[in-house]
Image (tube, rainbow, N blue to C red):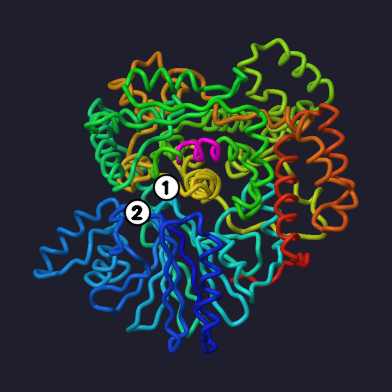
């Protein structure tokens, strides 16, 4: 795991450009504290920089930037190639006498470029990566990103330069970078709590889509269109339309495939462990790790003293059964609150999934013991784990049986004051453990869902924070044309799962894990996102994923072979924290300062009156506002960080690359 940055420009390079390049890589030093390197070709006006977190081959033989044996390619790359030993063996068989300098996967990747070219090599690779490679023959810079979007890659223009980097910090460190906020990206952020790809909060910058590469020529003047080397939509739609027969052998086949994926991702020359929440996904990953490890697997979890938010006891029970070397850390509200001021710097782009806080805390604790940690990310999106899949299907089917006018009347009644009061009263009678489900907060969303006339609209309502950008933003903005694929799926749930895997997974879940883990120089790996597992998951019939209204059926069957069902069968909690309590308590003054009406007016992004009304309603106990408020607070905190860098506020719908 590492960090990359660089540029290609039409002007002559000087010694100053190497200083600029080092400043760009130093900005992301947390991604690679073990080594750094730069490569500059002044005559070709290209500069590549790298920060290294040494995982495989810790010797100087793994130093980057690295040139291929042919000297044709120069590479900087962030990630891990899990089948690099297989590729090395294949290359050796095809190239007798090939002399290797070391044992790094970087060298194997370059040899693969020499042998098969870039597109051919990318299709053979099993791994997570974001890379930039300079072709000295064609004088082309190519950027590429892994199939599911585990590793980030930003690119855009700054003056005469084309820039790229693992994080926005690298790009904004270039002296020619102009920080102009995209109002359209801000609107999308308010709706979803993250900025969806390929959009970026800064005008002129894009995120490379997962499973794509892009070529830049003519000293940065010509930026090609992103090209897919792995067509996820085709894979998903083909699998959904022609699924396998639902037989007991499916469980055997999935277990075998997952065992291999986990085994490959356990390869490392540094200490390795796993996050363990005690839920289905992480428990299964740890089970398969321990099943093929000759020593105790190290597992890590954090707990909260508030019982309704605590899963640490479940994780401990699973760890005891499997015999892992388990470490847990109970964090107080003060521990969690101490993280809040640094969130804007860590995520580097507005991001308001509040589970970012416990994700950072468990990463920081884990890094004290290991350098690599496996996770269960991707299990929900691939195997039907989210409650919204069944809820969305029921609402869609039921709503279509009711005339549109009647649906809208019911929707309006669902959110009136009487309805809210009744739900609030009922919620107070529920056991404490169930209250975090936010039933009152969700009444607004149910009302909105009933008014939707398309599957796409239902999905957007289910995944939206509830914020209407038209009501909160200053000035105009345009709804993005990017969105879910047409709903030509055999099952509504398949459409939602596909769209989650294409949007929510890479732009929320994986962004959350990447930034939290890399902030403390920890490499996080996700075996469920092995592309072979993804492809197999989409060949499974829906009955193998969701049965009797319960998701991840087939994962539960595999897990039951390793862990008793009673240790993991329970309602899904998520990685929740009591943000609502904090905003009315210890975080109130912090929030009040960020939402102060004169500050909001001076910044020029939001309507001051609308923000003040939202804050008053929230403090007054009106439900359904927490996510909206948190997204505004996270943006305000992010903007404060950039103002500290003496940045001129500049809001624009400027040019897009």
Look at the image and say whether residue 364 sits in the magenta stretch.
yes
Magenta region: 359-367
Mark 2 and 1 residues: CB-CB less than 8 Å, in contact? yes
Horizontal side of residue 639 vs 546, given as left or right: right
Horizontal side of residue 149 vs 182, given as left or right: left
Horizontal side of residue 223 vs 67, given as left or right: right
The residue identified by callout 2 is 80
- Residues at marks 2 and 1, CA–CA distance in whole angstroms: 10 Å
Q: Closer to the camera, 446 or 308?
A: 308
Look at the image and say whether residue 222 sits in the magenta stretch.
no
In the image, residue 71 sits, relative to residue 97, either above or below, namely below
Q: Secondary structure at mark 2?
A: strand
Q: Closer to the camera, 380 or 5?
A: 5
Question: Is residue 208 visible in this depiction of the protein?
Answer: yes
Question: How many discs mark residues in the rendered view?
Answer: 2
| Residue 88, x across and y down, in percent | 19, 60
| Residue 392, x across and y down, in percent | 57, 32
| Residue occupying the point 81% across, 28% down | 622
The residue identified by callout 1 is 523
């Amino acid at each position: 795991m590492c960090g990359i940055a660089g540029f290609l420009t039409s002007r002559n390079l000087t010694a100053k450009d190497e200083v600029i390049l080092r400043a760009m890589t130093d900005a992301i030093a947390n991604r690679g504290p073990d080594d750094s390197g730069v490569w500059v070709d002044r005559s070709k006006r290209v500069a590549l920089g790298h920060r290294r977190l040494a995982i495989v081959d810790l010797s100087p033989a793994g130093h980057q930037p690295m040139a291929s044996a042919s000297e044709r390619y120069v590479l900087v790359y962030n990630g891990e190639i899990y089948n690099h030993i297989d590729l090395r063996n294949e290359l050796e068989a095809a190239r007798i006498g090939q002399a290797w300098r070391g044992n790094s996967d970087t060298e194997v990747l370059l040899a693969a470029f020499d042998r098969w070219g870039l597109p051919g090599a990318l299709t053979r690779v099993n791994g997570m990566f974001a890379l930039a490679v300079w072709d000295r023959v064609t004088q082309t810079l190519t950027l590429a990103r892994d199939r599911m979007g585990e590793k980030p890659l930003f690119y855009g223009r700054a003056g005469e330069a084309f820039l790229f980097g693992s994080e926005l910090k690298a790009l904004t460190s270039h002296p020619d970078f102009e920080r102009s906020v995209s109002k359209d990206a801000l609107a999308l952020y308010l709706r979803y709590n993250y900025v969806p790809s390929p959009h970026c909060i800064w005008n002129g910058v894009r995120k490379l889509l997962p499973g794509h590469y892009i070529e830049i020529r003519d000293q940065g003047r010509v930026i090609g269109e992103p090209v897919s080397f792995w067509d996820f939509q085709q894979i998903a739609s083909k699998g959904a339309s022609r699924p396998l027969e639902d037989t007991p052998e499916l469980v055997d086949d999935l277990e075998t495939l997952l065992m291999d994926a986990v085994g490959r991702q356990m390869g490392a020359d540094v200490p390795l462990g796993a996050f363990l929440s005690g839920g289905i996904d992480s428990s299964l990953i740890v089970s398969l790790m321990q099943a093929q490890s000759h020593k105790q697997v190290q597992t890590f979890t954090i707990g909260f003293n508030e019982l309704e938010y605590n899963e640490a006891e479940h994780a401990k029970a699973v760890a005891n059964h499997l015999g892992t070397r388990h470490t847990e850390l109970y964090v107080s509200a003060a521990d969690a609150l101490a993280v809040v001021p640094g969130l804007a710097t860590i995520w580097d782009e507005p991001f308001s999934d509040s589970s970012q806080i416990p994700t950072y805390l468990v990463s920081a604790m884990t890094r004290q013991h290991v350098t690599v940690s496996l996770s269960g990310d991707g299990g929900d999106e691939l195997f039907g784990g989210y409650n919204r899949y069944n809820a969305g299907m029921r609402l869609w089917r039921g709503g279509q049986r009711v005339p549109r006018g009647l649906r809208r009347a019911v929707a309006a009644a669902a959110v009136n004051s009487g309805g809210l009061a009744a739900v609030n009263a009922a919620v107070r009678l529920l056991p404490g453990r169930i209250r975090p489900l936010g039933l009152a907060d969700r009444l607004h969303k149910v009302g909105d869902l009933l008014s939707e006339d398309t599957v796409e609209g239902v999905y957007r309502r289910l995944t939206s924070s509830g914020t209407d950008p038209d009501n909160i933003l200053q000035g105009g903005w345009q709804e993005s044309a990017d969105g879910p694929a047409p709903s030509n799926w055999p099952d509504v749930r398949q459409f939602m799962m596909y769209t989650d895997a294409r949007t929510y997974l890479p732009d929320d879940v994986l962004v959350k894990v990447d930034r939290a883990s890399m902030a403390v120089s920890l490499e996080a790996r996700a075996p469920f996102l092995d592309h072979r597992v993804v492809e197999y998951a989409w060949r499974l019939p829906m009955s193998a994923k969701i049965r009797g209204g319960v998701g991840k059926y087939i994962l539960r069957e595999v897990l039951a072979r390793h862990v008793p069902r009673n240790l993991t069968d329970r309602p899904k909690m998520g990685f929740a924290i009591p943000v609502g309590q904090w905003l009315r308590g210890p975080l109130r003054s912090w929030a009040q300062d960020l939402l102060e009406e004169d500050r909001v007016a001076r910044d020029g992004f939001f309507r001051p009156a609308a923000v003040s009304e939202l804050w008053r309603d929230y403090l007054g106990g009106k439900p359904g506002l927490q996510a909206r408020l948190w997204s505004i607070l996270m943006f305000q905190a992010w903007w404060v960080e950039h103002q500290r860098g003496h940045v001129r506020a500049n809001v624009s719908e400027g040019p897009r690359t």
